[in-house]
Amino acid sequence: MGAVSAYVPLLTLLQLLDTLKLRSRYRLTLVDYQQIEYLEEQVLYFLEFLEIRLPGPDDPEIKPFVLEIHDSVLSACEVVDFHVVDQIRQSPFDSIEEGGDNGWLSTFSEDLIKVIRDLESIRCKIASLAPATQPSSIPYPSTSSMKGNRTKVVGFEHHISCIKDELGTSHVRSREVIPIVGMGGIGKTTLTWSVYEDRYIQRRFDKRCWVSVSLEYDLLRILQGILGKKNCDSVRDLGTELYQTLKGWKYLIVLDDMWDISAWEDLRQYFPDDNQGSRIIVTTRNSQLAASLGSYKAPYNVGFLDEEKSWELFCDRVFGGMCCLPELETFGKQIVDSCRGLPLGIVTIAGLLSKSDKTSEHWSSVSKDVASFVNLEDNEYCRKVLNLSYDNLPLHLKPVFLYIGGFYEEDEKIHMDGLIRSLVALAMVRPLPHKPIHHCAMDSLVELLQRNLIFIRDQDPIPIGQVVSLGVHDLLRDLCLKEISHEKLFDGFINQDGCTKCMFSAKRSFYLGRDTRHIRFCGSCKELHKSEGSHCSMFWNMRYFSDYAIMIRELPLLVSEIWNSPQLESIDLVLTTFTLNERKNHIILEQLVWLVIEDGTGGAWMREIANAMPNLKDLTLCRVEGSNTVTLPPLLERLKLVKAQDIEYHCFPQSLRELHLEQCRTTCSHVNEFGHALPNLEKLTVSNVFLVRCDDVWKPIEGGFRRLKCLDINGEFCRYWRSGSDIHFPQLQTLTVMNGSMDEIPRGLRTIGTLVLIYFFGCTTHVRNRLRWILKQQRLSGNDQLRLIINGEEEDDEADDDDDDNDDCDD
């Protein structure tokens, strides 16, 4: 049992104590406030002690303290949960009146005194150690946002060239399979992704799709992934639909990480072979499987990198492509030699070194550690290298990494928003003073990316490079699962009986209370697991509530109770009409950051929203009437309105940075007013809105939208956009127009030097030529960064712009 086994319960106890203080403020729970603050001080001491004292899991001097801290903290959590639940059960609907504690406070305090004495005893033992082991201030990296670029591909140039030739120039018209084989961590997926995303290859195929097969093969999931569906149609229906979708088209399918030939035997019938030149790439570790796929060519075997390419990859990841420091080069080359040319091993060790001291002493130590694995078999060697990086990971990052690797299915896309909410709700993130906990979670994810322990799966071009989803290599995921088992990380917190409908239910549940006797919502199968306990008691420490797919009679009671849970940070209500009238004692949800309401009919409640949720940052409202009477929180940064009516700009706070209007009823003049009334607006999305006047025209007024960086227009609103040659969006970076029927393009776009992406889907030949002319003018003005993508294909600036370049302005 290592340090993480004590660290995670400490984070949990810290969260419980924070909730207790909030509940005490509103007289929802009786506690001795000074006692809670003292206990909180003890928890912070032990967190800092573990962070500075424990470099690895096997420190013989510290290990006994880890076990004692673990047991004592778990006992503390049980004491807190027992007494809070007991108070709620006896007085579930009303706040506790002054003087009416019925002995609750005294018994609670007595039990907490026992807990505090245990922790004080451990602290006294720690004090007898050397001064170097005592807690001190721990520096943490700070990152304001998460943006990323695809990493440089090193060592696969020959393979990429050969596979591109096979895909792009082969005269074989029949459907062909291209197997790519190699051991885990050798770079098969990286190589294939580079080919798949190549502009030349994109243009050669009508349809493309990437899907991960994985060890736990599931035909239904694979077919859903290829078709982009989430519903549970039958395999037969999905297979028929896939065949009909691909029939008559030249397609490219990537089946990544195939382990069993039965997966191919089940899938091949759904890939039509009608002499269109279609190709299917299969990556696998199994050379026998690769030879059994029926390819007319031998599999592409991805081997180890040579010495030169290994060193290039290492320097790219440690020094950002710069040369290695002379005093470190000898040790660096020893480390690279010991990595045997395995890309995953090189980038993982490079990630460790890039975030640590660049001194000869440290690099010499790492070199000796890596060299000690040199006589191991390839697979065992790779595991040792990965473990070395994990062991040297700062303690506050380990729970985050283990959650990512152990709580998501193999090859699953891990969406950023949901990940951050879950990490915060489950107390996996170390809180820091004077910094929002969600920013702490983001900082941890950024550092894991920089250490090459996780990778970017998807990025949103709007804003440029914003990370949408993450992934983790399956070898690193295996490491996480073993560490979770070794650390017994969630013993005492998770009902290991689990769910009969999904594998990861116990791990992926959103807990509605730390006492596992209460109801929990399973994040995998979307089922509500019920057991004994009142409805109210299960909410007391819940941080993230979602009623998605919960179809139970008790739901109205559950929803009304969440407004009396001051610790809530994220709420997602999908099927419920609700009211704030149930708020007791004017409780303020001061921790609430995210709120999604899918049914806001009867908008009188919105007048209270600013008072009830003053720190709200992200708000989504659907089917809202009378939004012109809304008073929104003053710190709101992102607002999404769906099917809202009578929108007025004056009800929106000036703090707004993102505004999304979808299927709303508005006017062009109101959209213009947003540009002047919202000085901090950086992203505007107008999708399928309904204009009050059919003859309306949108002509942005000069001086508005001064900070707008991303403009996204979808649907009929495109037809109403008119502009002259003046600059109306001086900082615009990306313009997206989807499914629009525009007759003219605002030619003022040619003078916006900040543009980096114009994306149009669905346009006439005339509009396409205008866009090409704008690209050409931007090039002549020195903007070489601008990309123009029309209907999914990237354009260059050499196309003929016909007779459009003689016009200077639009009507």
Image (cartoon, rainbow, N blue to C red):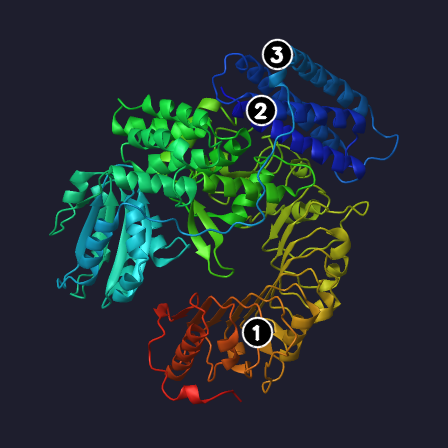
Q: Looking at this view, is 686 or 798 the one in front?
A: 798
Q: Secondary structure at mark 3?
A: loop
The earlier-in-sequence mark between 2 and 3 is: 2
Query: Which amino acid type is shown beneath numbered disc 3?
Result: Leu
In percent of width and height, residue 214 lies at 31, 42
Q: Is residue 95 visible?
A: no
Look at mark 3 in the image and give the residue it sits on.
129
Look at mark 1 in the image and give the residue it sits on.
689
Q: Secondary structure at mark 1?
A: loop
In percent of width and height, residue 598 lies at 60, 58
Q: Secondary structure at mark 2?
A: helix
Circle number at residue 306 = none
Query: Which amino acid type is shown beneath numbered disc 2?
Result: Ile
CA separation in Å, label 3 and label 1: 67 Å
Furthest toward the front, the residue is 326
Identify the residue shown where x is 48% and y is 52%: 467
Q: Answer with left or right where residue 219 lies relative to residue 575.
A: left
The answer to whether mark 3 and mark 1 are in CB contact below 8 A is: no
| Crowd rating for badge 3 (residues with CA inside 10 Å; few <14, some 14–19, many 20+) | few
Instruction: Note whether 799 is above or below 35 in the view shown.
Output: below
Look at mark 2 in the image and give the residue it sits on.
52
In percent of width and height, residue 230 lies at 42, 54
| Crowd rating for badge 2 (residues with CA inside 10 Å; few <14, some 14–19, many 20+) | some
Instruction: Note whether 496 is above or below 463 in the view shown.
Output: above
> Which numbered mark, 3 or 1, is in the foreground of this view?
3
Identify the residue shown where x is 50% and y is 81%: 747
Q: Looking at this view, is 583 or 338 the one in front?
A: 338
